[in-house]
Amino acid sequence: MGRGAGYAYADLDEDDMFAVLESRDTSFAGAFFVGITSTGTYCRPGCAAKVPMRKDCRFFASAEEAEAAGFRTCKLCRPDRLKGPSKRSNERAVRLRGPAQA
């Protein structure tokens, strides 16, 4: 497995994702997120927190999926900052720009 740029959640199995966590490879940031059941938090690859036990890991394609599963953001790596624009920010942008011209 090479560097993380270009990899997506669908390209990796859970063993690959755990290997990335153990190596703390930040190049996979945004490719997947990991929920840690023992702490109730979710992180991005490369987080400085202690590597969790494999049995405590659940993997997600997006931060939104991790949050929907009941995990809260890690205060060290702030995985919520990797999210794309929210529906609310998109609606605000439309209000500021005005509707698209047909």
Image: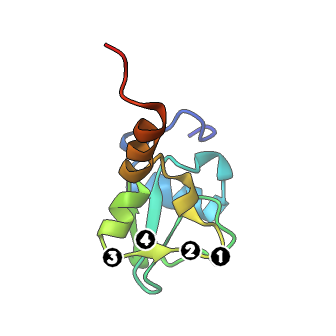
In space, the residues marked 1 and 3 are separated at their CA atoms by 19 Å
In space, the residues marked 3 and 4 are separated at their CA atoms by 9 Å
**Amino acid at circle 3:** Gly
In space, the residues marked 4 and 2 are separated at their CA atoms by 10 Å
Label 2 near label 4: C-beta < 8 Å? no
Residue position marked by numbered label 1 in the rendering: 49
**Amino acid at circle 4:** Gly
Q: Estimate the x, y position of residue 68 in percent, counting from the top left.
A: 30, 67
Q: Is residue 13 left or right of residue 76?
A: left
The structure residue drawn at horizontal position 65% and vertical position 76%, both measured from the top left corner, is 49
Q: Nearer the viewer, mark 2 or mark 1?
A: 2
Among all residues in the image, which is located at the extreme top?
102
Q: Nearer the viewer, mark 1 or mark 3?
A: 3
**Amino acid at circle 2:** Cys
Say few, some or many: other residues with alpha carbon within 10 Å of mark 2 (under 14 / 14 to 19 / 20 or more).
some
Q: Name the secondary structure under disc 3.
A: loop
Instruction: Check residue 101 in the rendering and tell me which mark sits there, or answer none.
Output: none
Q: In which quadrant will I find the N terminus?
A: top right
Label 1 near label 2: C-beta < 8 Å? yes
Say few, some or many: other residues with alpha carbon within 10 Å of mark 4 (under 14 / 14 to 19 / 20 or more).
many
Instruction: Check residue 74 in the rendering and tell me which mark sits there, or answer none.
Output: 2
In the figure, residue 10 lies in which quadrant? Answer: top left
Residue position marked by numbered label 3 in the rendering: 70
Considering only vertical position in the picture, is 81 above or below 72? above
Residue position marked by numbered label 4 in the rendering: 35
Q: In which quadrant will I find the C terminus?
A: top left
Q: Estimate the x, y position of residue 47 in percent, counting from the top left.
A: 64, 66
Considering only order in the chain, which callout, 3 or 1, is on the residue closer to the N terminus? Answer: 1
Q: Estimate the x, y position of residue 39 in percent, counting from the top left.
A: 47, 85
